[in-house]
Amino acid sequence: MPTVSQLMTHHADRVTSSATIAEAASLMMGARLSSVIVIDGEKVLGIVTERDILRA
C-alpha cells in the first residue's frame, strides 16, 4: 500500500492568514481547488475549504 508521502501533493497552493476570503476563493477558483492551506510564515495553521467559504 502506498504511503501518504507518495500520494500527497508536494507543492500545494497556500494563502497567508492575513489573506481575505475573496483572495482565497479567487485562488481556489483559478486553480480549480476545493481547499487551500493557510500559513503564517512557514507554519501551517490549517486549511480553508469551499464549504468554509460558502458559510462565511
Image: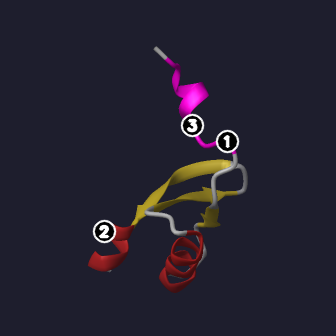
Magenta stretch contains residue 8: yes
Which comes sooner in the sequence, label 2 or label 3? 3
**Residue range of the region highlighted in magenta in the rendering:** 2-10
Residue drawn at x 51%, y 77% is: 29
The amino acid type, in three-letter code, at marker 3 is Met
- Tell me the number on the disc at residue 10: 1
Disc 2 to disc 3, C-alpha distance: 21 Å
In the picture as drawn, the residue positioned furthest to the top comes out as 1
In the image, 34 versus 24, the foreground residue is 34
Q: Is residue 6 left or right of residue 22?
A: right
Residue 6 placed where, x, y %? 60, 26
State how the image is colored: secondary structure
Residue drawn at x 54%, y 75% is: 24
Residue drawn at x 67%, y 41% is: 10
Q: Are marks 3 and 1 in contact (CB under 8 Å)?
A: yes
Residue drawn at x 59%, y 27% is: 5
Which comes sooner in the sequence, label 1 or label 2? 1
- Considering the image in quadrants, where does the C terminus appear? bottom left
Name the residue that disc number 3 marks. 8
The 10 Å Cα crowd at callout 2, few under 14, some 14 to 19, many 20 or more, is few
Name the residue that disc number 2 marks. 51
Residue 21 placed where, x, y %? 48, 80
The amino acid type, in three-letter code, at marker 1 is His
- As helix, strand or loop, the secondary structure at mark 2 comes to helix
Q: Is residue 6 left or right of residue 33?
A: right
- Name the front one of labels 1 and 2: 1
- Name the front one of labels 2 and 3: 3
